[in-house]
Each structure stands twice: as structure tokens, then as C-alpha cells.
Amino acid sequence: SEIAEAMEGERKGLMDDKLKHRPMAEVELADAVIRIGDYCGRWGYDLGGAIIEKMAYNAHRADHKIENRIKEGGKKF
């Protein structure tokens, strides 16, 4: 739900209603990271390790390369 709220804020260019000096998307993404961290802590997941491994994997994916992202139909997010 936090990520959906972030996307809505991004699409509409909204500022956050509680932290008025920050974009809504930024604050909602912070909420998502907090919730994910809490969840991983509860279940004992190694989030940091998984992030490092996933970033290394993604670094070699053709669809993640800038030149492919900017093409028509490329990944925007």
C-alpha cells in the first residue's frame, strides 16, 4: 500500500501532507522501507545480503541497462 501511495504521489506531483517540505512519493517510499525492515526483522530475513546479491544479478541484465531502458517500450521504473 505504501508503494501504491508513492506512485500516486509521483503521478500527481503531490507533496506529503505530514512532512510538507518533502514529496509524497519520497515519504511513502520511506514508509515502505521501514515496513520492509520491520518485516525482515520479525522473520529473520537477511535483507542486506539479498539486496547486495540482487543488485549484482541485475547489473548483468540486458533489460536493466540504460540504453535498453530508454528505448521505446523499455522499463521506466
Image: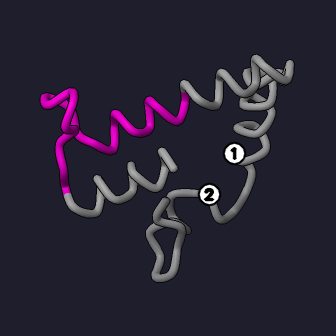
Q: In the drawing, does residue 4 fall left or right of residue 47? A: left
Q: Amino acid at mark 2?
A: His
Residue 50's image quarter? top right
The dot on residue 28 is none
Find out whether residue 31 is within the magenta segment: yes
- Residue at 18% in and 50% down: 14
Residue topped by disc 2: 64
Q: Which comes before the other along the chain, label 1 or label 2? A: 1
- Mark 2 burial class by Cα count in 10 Å: few <14, some 14-19, many 20+: some
Q: Nearer the viewer, residue 69 or 32?
A: 32
Q: Amino acid at mark 1?
A: Ala
Disc 2 secondary structure class: helix
Q: Nearer the viewer, residue 48 or 1?
A: 1
Q: Is residue 2 above or below residue 75?
A: above
Residue topped by disc 1: 59
Looking at the picture, the colour scheme in use is one colour
Residue 11's image quarter? bottom left
Q: In the drawing, does residue 52 fall left or right of residue 36? A: right
Q: Position of residue 22 (x, y in %)?
A: 20, 32
Q: Position of residue 38 (x, y in %)?
A: 66, 21
- Residue at 44% in and 38% down: 29
Q: Nearer the viewer, residue 77 or 17?
A: 17
| Residue projecting furthest to the right | 44
Task: Write down the region rendered in magenta.
Answer: 13-33
